[in-house]
Image (tube, helix red, strand yellow):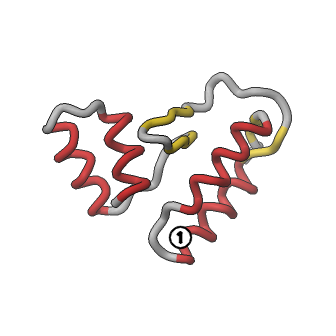
Amino acid sequence: MKRQEVSQKQYDILVGQCRYPKTSEARQRCRTQVREQYKVGAFNPNLDCRTYSGVSVCGVLELDAAQRSCVEESVGGGLTRRRAEVECYAFR
């Protein structure tokens, strides 16, 4: 797989979001995936980055079952799916 080029800021967000998974194994897997899938270069307008509740993330978030349930509950309560994914990923 060819590594996607992203800006330094996007790369920093990708690495930073690896602090949220609950286990050390998941955090390490996240950091490894970032290193394997991305390289610093130019800004990538196709990378889905967003910030909610002070948390910035980029790309597809790997949610566990509890987080997916949290997303569904939050969307049912009126949050947008994008916001619910970020908040459930970071805080659940």
Residue at 42 percent of width and 40 percent of height: 53
Residue at 75 percent of width and 35 percent of height: 6
56 or 39: nearer the viewer? 56
The tally of labels here is: 1
Residue at 56 percent of width and 76 percent of height: 25
Which residue in the rendered view is the most extreme toward the front? 54
Q: Position of residue 57 (x, y in %)?
A: 54, 43
Q: Position of residue 55 (x, y in %)?
A: 50, 44
Q: Position of residue 15 (x, y in %)?
A: 67, 54
Q: Is residue 18 left or right of residue 55?
A: right
Splitting the image into 4 quarters, where does residue 22 fall?
Answer: bottom left
Q: Is residue 36 left or right of residue 17?
A: right
For the C terminus, give its image quadrant.
Answer: bottom left
The correct choice, above or below, for 5 with respect to 19 in the image is: above
For label 1, the SS is helix
Splitting the image into 4 quarters, where does residue 27 fall?
Answer: bottom right
Q: Is residue 5 left or right of residue 92?
A: right
Q: Amino acid at mark 1?
A: Ala
Which residue in the rendered view is the most extreme toward the right? 41
The correct choice, above or below, for 34 with respect to 42 in the image is: below
Which residue in the rendered view is the most extreme toward the bottom? 24
Which residue in the rendered view is the most extreme toward the top? 45
**Residue denoted by label 1:** 26
Q: Position of residue 58 (x, y in %)?
A: 57, 40
- How packed mark 1 is, by other alpha carbons closer than 10 Å (few <14, some 14-19, many 20 or more), is some
